Amino acid sequence: MFKLPFLSRSKSTTQVSNAVEQQEASVQNINALAELFGAMPSLAGPVVTPKTSMKVSIVFACVRLIAGAIAQMPVHIFEQGEGNNKSRVPNHPMASLLNLQPTPAWSAATFWEFIVSSMLLHGDGLAVLLRDRNGDVTEVLPISPVGAHIENNNGRLNYFFNIDGISRGFDQDDILHFPGFGFNGLRSMSVIQWGAFNSIGLELAMEQHSGEFFKSGSTQRVAVVKKGKWDEAQQDKFRNAWVKVYGGVENSKFPLVLDESTDIKALSLSAKDSQLLESREFQITDIARAFGLPSFMVNQEQKSTSWGSGIGEIGLSFLRFTLGPHLNRFEQELNRKLFLNKPMFAEFIAANLMRLTLKDRNEAYRQAIGGSQGPGWMSIDEVRKLENLPELGGSYSLPYDPIAANNPQSET
C-alpha cells in the first residue's frame, strides 16, 4: 500500500456558518465535547448521542431503512459520448470498489450502510481514497467521523484521523466527504443533534418511565390512609406486606386485604391518564419527520397516506423526496473527486426501488414494445434483459415498427 504523506496543521480560515448557528465556534465546540463525553442532556433529561439514539426503535428503523435502501443500489460508471449519449463502463476499476469490495474487510453493502448511517447520525460520512504510486485508487477506507478533525487551509480542506493508532492527515482530494443537510464548509447538520434532539430525549424518557411502570407491577404510587393513629411497628408491618404483594410483576397477582378503616389514595397518574401511549405515537411521527420519512414506512399504522396507494407510487415518492437529496450529494462527491475533468461519471441506479408488480410491469412492457397503436421504444431483448432472461437475438433485438411490419420489402 502506498504510504500517503502526513499534512501538518495550520490555522484555518473562517468557514461559512449554518443559518441556525448563532455562535459558530461555541456551538461547534460544545457539540464536539458533548459527543466525546456524552454529556448533553435533552429537555426531558436523558442524554442524546448517536449511540443512545440508536437504542430508540424508531431511530434505528429510520436509519436502517434509508441506509439499506441506498446500500442496495448499484453504482454504475458511465462514459459521456456525443449528443449526451452515455455508455456504461462495466469493467472500470472503481466499479468493483463501489459495488463489491471497497476494502478487504468490508463489502460494498456494509460500506454504504456505514457511510449513510454516519451521515444521518453524525452529519457526515467519510472515506479515505488510498492510491498506488501511479495515483490510481486501489482502496476506499471508511472512517468514523467521531474524532475526525477538519480544517480549512487557504480554501482547501485538510482532514486528520487516527488510523491504526497513527495520526494521519489528508488533502481533500484523497477524502470522499459525503455531507448531510446544512453543510457549512466543514461539517453538516446531524439529524440527531438538530432535527430530533429533544424528540429523541423525550422518547428515551418515556421508555424509561414505561419500563419502571411495568417493572413495579403496573401500579400507581399511592398513600394508605387509616382512621386513627398507627404505631411504628404497624406501619412497618403494613409496608412490608405491601411490598411483598406489589413489589414486582411476578407478585402483582396477589390481592392485598385491608380492613374497613383503611383507604387508598392515588398519588400519581396512570399510563392512560398521562396519555403515555398517545405521546409515544406522536414522538414516532415527529422523529420520522426529522429523517424525512412518512411514519407508515416504519410500521406506524395510519388510516390514509398522501404518498400513493401502490407499492410503485410509494417507492417513487420515497426515492424522490427522501433518498433523492442524499443521492444527489453522494453522486456529486464521487464525480468531483474521481472523475473531475474526465468524460465519465458515477450514478446510483434506483431501478429496484422503482420496480412495479408483475402485472404493472407486463402492462408497461407491452406499451414499450409497441403494437398496433404505434412503434415501440424498447426491443423484446431489452425487456428480457430487465427480467434477467437470456437474449434471443435477431429481430428480437430491434424495437417493433408497425409500418415496416405491414409493408415488408420484397426480396431482391
Image: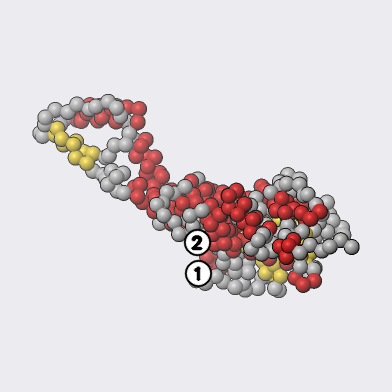
Residue 219 coordinates in the image, percent (x, y):
29, 37
User: In the rendered image of this protein, does residue 71 appear above or below residue 156?
Assistant: above
Confirm whether residue 200 shows in the render.
Answer: no
In the image, is 194 to the left or to the right of 368? left
User: In the rendered image of this protein, does residue 202 appear above or below residue 271?
Assistant: below
When asked about the image quadrant of residue 154, the answer is: bottom right
Residue 198 coordinates in the image, percent (x, y):
43, 57
Residue behind mark 2: 194
- The residue at the point 40 percent across, 44 percent down is 208
Tag 2 or tag 1, which sits nearer the N-term? 1
- The front one of 333 and 190 is 333
- Kindly check if marks 1 and 2 are in contact, taking CB atoms under 8 A apart as contact: yes
Mark 2: which amino acid? Trp
In the image, is 246 to the left or to the right of 43? left
- The residue at the point 34 percent across, 39 percent down is 213
- Quadrant (top left/top right/bottom left/bottom right) for the C terminus: bottom right
Residue behind mark 1: 20
**SS under mark 1:** loop
Residue 297 coordinates in the image, percent (x, y):
49, 51
Dot 1 alpha-carbon crowd within 10 angstroms: few under 14, some 14 to 19, many 20 or more: few
Mark 1: which amino acid? Val
The colour scheme is: secondary structure
Residue 130 coordinates in the image, percent (x, y):
78, 55
In the image, is 15 to the left or to the right of 166? left
User: In the rendered image of this protein, does residue 252 appear above or below residue 25?
Assistant: above
